[in-house]
Image: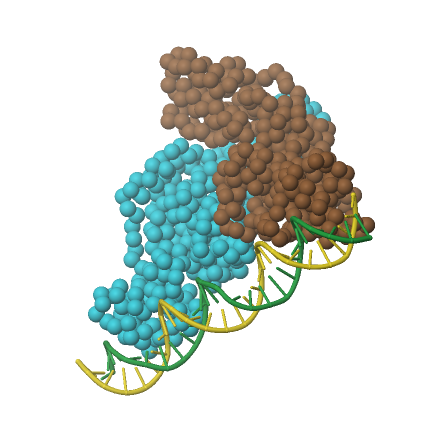
Chain colours: A cyan, B brown, C yellow, D green
Amino acid sequence: MELTARKKQILKVVTERYIDAAEPVGSKFIAQAMGGNLSSATIRNELADLTELGYLEQPHTSAGRIPSPKGYRLYVNELMERRSVSDQEAAAISQALGGRMRELDSVIAQAGQLVSSIVSYPAYAAAVGKGGVTIRRFDLLPVDTGSFIAVVMTADSRVKSRLLRTDLPVEAEQLSALANLLNTHFTETGPEGMGEKLMALTGQLPPELFMPLSLAVEYAGEVMDRSARNQVFTTGQTQLLLQPEFQDPGRANELMRLLTDQKAELPVLDENTPMQILIGPENVNEALKDASVVVASYDIGENMRGLIGVVGPTRMDYAAVAARLSYFAESLTKMFGKSNQLPPKEENKS
Amino acid sequence: MELTARKKQILKVVTERYIDAAEPVGSKFIAQAMGGNLSSATIRNELADLTELGYLEQPHTSAGRIPSPKGYRLYVNELMERRSVSDQEAAAISQALGGRMRELDSVIAQAGQLVSSIVSYPAYAAAVGKGGVTIRRFDLLPVDTGSFIAVVMTADSRVKSRLLRTDLPVEAEQLSALANLLNTHFTETGPEGMGEKLMALTGQLPPELFMPLSLAVEYAGEVMDRSARNQVFTTGQTQLLLQPEFQDPGRANELMRLLTDQKAELPVLDENTPMQILIGPENVNEALKDASVVVASYDIGENMRGLIGVVGPTRMDYAAVAARLSYFAESLTKMFGKSNQLPPKEENKS
DNA sequence: TTTAGCACTCTGTTCCCCCGAGTGCTAAAG
DNA sequence: CTTTAGCACTCGGGGGAACAGAGTGCTAAA
């Protein structure tokens, strides 16, 4: 059986109507929507074919049709009109991005919030490094005799710091010596390398120096670890509860759990793919089996990518979401490309 | 009409049974629970009185009784047996707190998570300063000619840092001079004071120094601002959806919104109150009018308090939650009291 | 003051019926 | 071969009616 142009046209009507009204679509409506040149009986024949081909489903014998995941897939791949964002939307997005956003983590989190508010579905955002992160530079600042501040800068130019406490007093000069040591031996290497180096130094240093050193190294490890398993921010979870398909608390709960407790399980985009749409069972994660995800990526500097995704019912408005999301991702890429360019890698100065 | 001991006893039975079973309690059950010495008819008379007095409510004419907010209040104030945590629970809490928790913000967030998992309700956590926060110390670390790292330490010993970029190149010596300037003129003052100082310096400094200075000051202002309007962490929101009273998506949604988007609206504890229970309409916030909140505070160093609260249905198990929460708060106070003591205030060294 | 007895009220459930929407099929028309 | 009109059929949802069960309130007696 062939998938004629007319069948596709019908599939398109069904899908869009269903996205809009959230209830099964009948032959009569379709006939009308297609110009009234065909009778509903003809449509019914076509519908039967489309159902047999697996593009449509029937909730029960005598209801209208709704798209199956396969149907949505075809819709998304071929039928959907690639919409572009309206001028107002574009303006709104640009304006929102125009605000001062400096800190990388907060840029990411805010991007998620923005997207969620724009598309009215929950959104998630993360940054993924293209490789493991290393520390580019250490600084140790004396506070008082029992404590000092460790400042580490990662290869991707995030800066993190923490107040560390030692049992034994340490002099300011000793700290700067330690910082030197750290910068010469503990940069540009992963956590394992650091561990080895630290081992090698055990016993070679007096204990009042070894302790702050190991504290600093431990902290560095934590920082690397935290940015390696990419932190995911989610927002707008409540939007889900407003969707008719998630009125059933059981179903809603599962997804809510994913969005709050198991953020790390949310789908990540393959490298080099600008945007991906995952429909229902195409999702690996069990909780997403009857939801859909649209996820896009943007570039942050040279070797990092930002990830931004939207979670909604399979019935979500793919055209609108995809358009907004990709516009958004492009804007972010542009933004990182110029004004907020990350500084080039450079030699360490102690 | 008097509130006899027997009436109170009945109120207690009703409340506890309702907390447990989530359905109206009938006279027969009560008669039995009270030893079987009284007939259900007698109980019914008492119930009628209690209802008239406003301690009980009837969902409909021929259902059992449930406690009114007033009834809960009496229960909490007088009837509830102050439970203490079991040894296992105490051990579990201690163990969880024993883990490495260093960074103040993450201690707070983790405390929230822990409480939520212990009581099976959503929880929130925050730290409130007893006054405005000031900056205790600045450090400026050179990165390359176009950028430097600003590290600020607040009076309450939180350390924050950020990479800042300048248009004009700045030398390392200039940076340390600037740091000196900052440490002498911009510490121990609020954002307004800083603004004035900065104004006063406008024009007195060459532009290549003024820009980094104002960037650092701006950043400091941001840090102060962020810790002033106390950040609230919430966790366990999904637990709500499991409660029978929040099966109605409308009601659930309102609360979810509060817990995710309007965290700042969550009730704060009066100073010097160790713990407070807010029942239903006692809450100011509209969304909490038929929910209850138990909130406790603990000490963090000299002039900060931590806040930790639990949100649940009015039917929540006050005895259990209160016991665990207060044990938890005490443990935290102890923890901050000894091992993790904040360093004393001290002179700035540049 | 307590209790037994009883009529009453209200909810939730089940069953039934019917309506309407929509289908699938057949047979005729184009 | 395609389209269409016609028609019987299916199924879910809505609207009672009937009913069981839980629980009450009241009365009158112990």
Q: Give the residue at x 80% y 52%.
A: B36
Q: Is residue A139 visible?
A: no
- Residue A212 figure quarter: top right
- Residues B56 and A305: in front is B56
- Residue B322 figure quarter: top right
* Percent x, y of residue A126: 48, 46
Q: Give the residue at x 63% y 25%.
A: B271
Is A129 above or below relative to B225?
below
- Residues B291 and B182: in front is B291
* Percent x, y of residue A47: 34, 72
Total numbered badges shown on the rendered structure? 0
Left or right for B10, reference C24: right
Is A129 above or below relative to B272?
below
Q: Give the residue at x 25% y 72%.
A: A39
Left or right for B275, reference A29: right
Is B61 above or below relative to A212?
below
Left or right for A131, reference B302: left
- Residues B116 and B223: in front is B116
Q: Is residue A44 visible?
A: yes
* Percent x, y of residue A273: 40, 54
**The N terminus of chain B sits in image quarter:** top right
* Percent x, y of residue B236: 59, 45
Q: Give the residue at x 63% y 52%.
A: B63
**The C terminus of chain B sits in image quarter:** top right
